[in-house]
Structures are given as structure tokens and as C-alpha cells.
Image (spheres, rainbow, N blue to C red):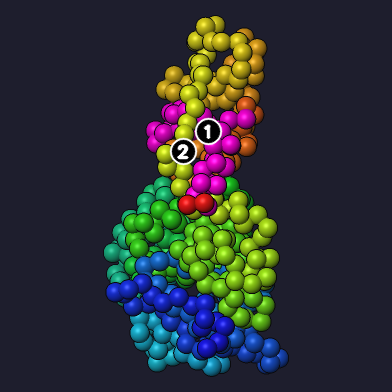
């Protein structure tokens, strides 16, 4: 058994994998392998992320699924069928594909860009445009953007259109090649959450390529870490990857702060909350002078902190992230450590203040879970 075979998990009981790599290798004229003896099963209806340094074979592996790259050795199966036995053009039209640069046609409107694949599949123009209008809403874009051209959109909007185009023919498989790497970090985080929302609704089989281990662990149900030379180093759920890297390469790639990031997968359910001393702009005069004071709006949503003794101004000290009750220990610890008062603000599902969280309580919970 090869090392790649030893780390590849089996598909979930009762369901066959959507994509299989069987002893797949790809070499170019130089003789250096881009992918070496890849054995991998991609679960149906899940997000699988390929991650690794530049030149490790992750994009090459992705492109072998739709025959944009042909393997030198081995077999790639999609839904049990050898992709080499299928016409390449038809195979590609049966899958969604999202590029780093969105790849939109600049001379076509947004609606016509989204309708591209249905039109190639013979869908009448009117029907294809109706489907395109529906997908604008699915990816969170205003219908008014349908008449615009790509150059009139922001980078984040272009990527959403690219996702809509990939979904237009309702493909079972969505291939995404570093789709969010060209946008700024704030937009990137929004697009990651949008993808997770879409996946909850659509349950596609998504293969996602990135060089960013944080992105991989945020969106992936399973993560395949590729090493230099096209070797599959580890294939596991993100929490296992962070908790138990199989070798020094994976440990180094995941990073020294993997313990902190693993808190994202530890539930903060039932984490004790301290009562919060709060006031609104209209109730400052009756607020206690000692200690930090949390300022909220009239609906109970947090606005910021006033330091001890400052009660004549609502120029609250902002800063610090919020902790949503019931989310992860990482979010709770981040809220506590980033707060100017030393205590993180916990909010309920409506955004109202639910209490305060202390970093010491989070660390005690983490220690208890490890002991348990």
C-alpha cells in the first residue's frame, strides 16, 4: 500500500464516492511528477478542499476530473464512470467550473454570462435567462445587476456571477480553482460564508483548490494536503488535520497556531456567561461609575465600551469581536482577548447582548474537554 492509499478514507457507509482517483499520476516533459500515485475518494454532496504549496499538483488534480488535464497513468472515475471514456466537451458541460479571475465574457451581460452553459446545452434563450435571473438571487445579487457587464461589477460581485454561471445547468459537481484568492480579505470571508450557505441549500459535490490553510479548514468537510512532488500527504476532516498532522510537512504547513484554530471545531454550548452592565445614551446618568460600561442601542445590540469613570460621553471605545452564543470556543476566546475591557461580548441570534465571556472560562472549558 502506498502512503497516499494509507491516508485516504473510505466513503461514508451507504453512499458511493462521487469522484475517485485510482493510482493517478501526471508527468510532463521534464519528467518531474506533477501528481504522484494519487488514490483519493471524494464524498458525494460534500466540500473537499485541495490545499498545498505552489507546484504540489492540487490544480492539476482538479483539472483531471473534467479532462482539462489528462493523467499519464491511472484512472479518474466520476459517479463510477471512467472520465476518459466520455467526450471531453460534454463532460465539462456536465460540471460547474469557477476560476480565480471569474472568467466572465466581457462583451456579454451578467444574465447572458450566467446563461452560457444552458445555451450550449440547447436550452432556449428565454428559458436560460429566466434561470439566470433566479440564480442572481441565489448568490445574493440584485436583479438590477443582470443588465450590467462584468467591468461594471466589483471583484466580489464578479465572483458571485462566476458561481451563478457554474450552477446554471444544475451540475452535480462544482470545481472551484482558487476562486476567492483575487479579492480582499473582507470580501473573501463573505464569499466563503456565502458558499457554505449555498452548500446547505444545494448539497453539491464541491472540489475546491486553495493555497490558504485557513480557507481550507473554514469551508472543507475534508481537506487533502498535497506536498511538493504531487504527493498526497494527508486527507482528513479539518479538525483532525489540525489536531493530529501525520508528519512534519503537514504540521509545518498547517502552522504552529493550529491548536488555536482547532478551537473553531470545539463547541461553546453551555459556556458560562457573566452578567453585563449596560446602558444606552439615555441612561448614562444612572449608570455605575466603576468598571467598564457596555453601551447598547435601544434594541440591546452592543455599540462599544466606556472605560471606568467616563460617563459623560457616548464616544464608546470600539474594538473586539462578538461571540454568538452556542458557536465555537475559538470565537469565544477571540472575543474575550480582543475586547478592550478584557471580557468578550456574547450576543444571541438576534444580535442582542446576552452576557460577557471570560478568557479564563474558555480555557477551563478547553482543558475539561481535553481531559474528558
Q: Nearer the viewer, residue 102 or 298?
A: 298
Task: Work out which residue is located at the far top of the displayed protein and give it.
Answer: 285
Kind of element beneath mark 2? loop
Q: Which of 338 and 174 is in front in this view?
A: 338
Q: Which of 35 and 28 is in front in this view?
A: 35
Is residue 53 shown above or below 73? Answer: above
The x, y position of residue 16, in whole percent, is 33, 78
Kind of element beneath mark 1? strand
Residue hosting label 2: 271
Is residue 43 shown above or below 163? Answer: below
Q: Could you give the CA–CA distance between mark 2 and mark 1, rounded to whole angstroms?
A: 8 Å
Left or right side of 36 for 90: left
Q: Which residue is drawn at 48% across and 24% down?
A: 275
Left or right side of 33 for 88: left
Q: Does the magenta stretch include residue 304?
A: no
Q: Residue at x 47, y 31 (%)?
A: 273
Left or right side of 259 for 237: left
Q: Which of 189 and 184 is in front in this view?
A: 189
Residue hosting label 1: 357
The mark tally for this picture is: 2
| Residue 100 appears in view | no
The x, y position of residue 223, in whole percent, is 52, 67
| Marks 2,1: beta carbons within 8 A | yes
| Residue 9 appears in view | yes
Is residue 273 shown above or below 174? Answer: above
Q: Give the range drawn in magenta.
A: 342-370
Q: Picture quarter containing residue 11?
A: bottom left
Q: Residues within 10 Å of mark 2 (few under 14, many from 20)?
A: some
Amino acid at each position: 500500500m502506498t502512503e497516499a492509499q494509507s491516508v485516504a478514507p473510505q466513503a461514508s457507509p451507504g453512499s458511493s464516492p462521487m469522484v475517485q482517483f485510482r493510482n493517478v499520476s501526471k508527468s510532463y516533459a521534464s519528467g518531474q511528477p506533477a501528481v504522484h500515485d494519487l488514490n483519493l475518494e471524494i464524498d458525494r454532496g460534500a466540500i473537499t478542499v485541495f490545499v498545498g504549496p505552489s507546484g504540489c499538483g492540487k490544480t492539476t488534480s482538479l483539472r483531471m476530473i473534467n479532462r482539462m488535464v489528462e493523467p499519464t497513468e491511472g484512472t479518474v472515475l466520476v459517479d463510477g464512470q471512467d472520465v476518459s471514456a466520455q467526450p471531453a466537451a460534454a463532460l465539462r458541460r456536465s460540471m460547474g467550473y469557477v476560476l480565480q479571475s471569474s472568467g466572465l465574457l466581457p462583451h456579454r451581460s451578467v444574465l447572458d454570462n450566467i446563461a452560457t452553459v444552458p445555451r450550449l446545452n440547447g436550452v432556449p434563450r428565454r428559458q436560460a435567462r429566466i434561470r439566470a435571473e433566479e440564480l442572481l438571487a441565489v448568490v445574493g445579487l440584485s436583479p438590477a445587476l443582470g443588465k450590467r457587464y462584468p467591468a461594471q461589477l466589483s471583484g466580489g460581485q464578479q465572483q458571485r456571477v462566476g458561481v451563478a454561471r457554474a450552477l446554471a445547468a444544475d451540475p452535480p459537481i462544482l470545481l472551484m480553482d482558487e476562486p476567492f484568492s483575487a479579492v480582499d480579505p473582507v470580501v473573501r470571508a463573505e464569499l466563503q460564508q456565502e458558499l457554505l450557505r449555498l452548500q446547505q441549500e444545494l448539497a453539491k459535490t464541491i472540489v475546491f483548490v486553495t493555497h490558504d490553510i485557513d480557507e481550507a479548514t473554514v469551508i472543507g468537510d475534508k481537506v487533502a494536503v498535497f506536498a511538493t512532488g504531487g504527493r498526497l500527504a494527508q486527507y482528513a476532516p479539518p479538525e483532525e488535520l489540525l489536531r493530529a498532522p501525520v508528519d512534519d510537512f503537514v504540521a509545518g504547513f498547517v502552522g504552529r497556531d493550529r491548536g488555536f484554530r482547532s478551537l473553531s471545531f470545539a463547541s461553546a454550548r453551555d459556556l458560562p456567561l457573566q452578567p453585563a452592565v449596560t446602558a444606552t445614551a439615555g441612561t448614562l446618568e444612572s449608570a455605575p461609575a466603576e468598571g467598564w460600561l457596555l453601551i447598547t442601542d435601544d434594541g440591546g445590540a452592543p455599540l462599544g465600551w466606556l472605560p471606568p469613570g467616563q460617563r459623560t460621553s457616548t464616544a464608546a471605545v470600539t474594538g473586539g469581536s462578538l461571540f454568538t452564543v452556542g458557536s465555537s470556543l475559538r470565537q469565544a476566546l477571540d472575543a474575550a482577548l480582543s475586547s478592550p475591557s478584557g471580557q468578550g461580548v456574547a450576543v444571541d441570534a438576534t444580535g442582542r447582548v446576552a452576557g460577557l465571556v471570560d478568557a479564563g472560562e474558555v480555557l477551563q472549558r478547553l482543558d475539561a474537554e481535553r481531559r474528558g
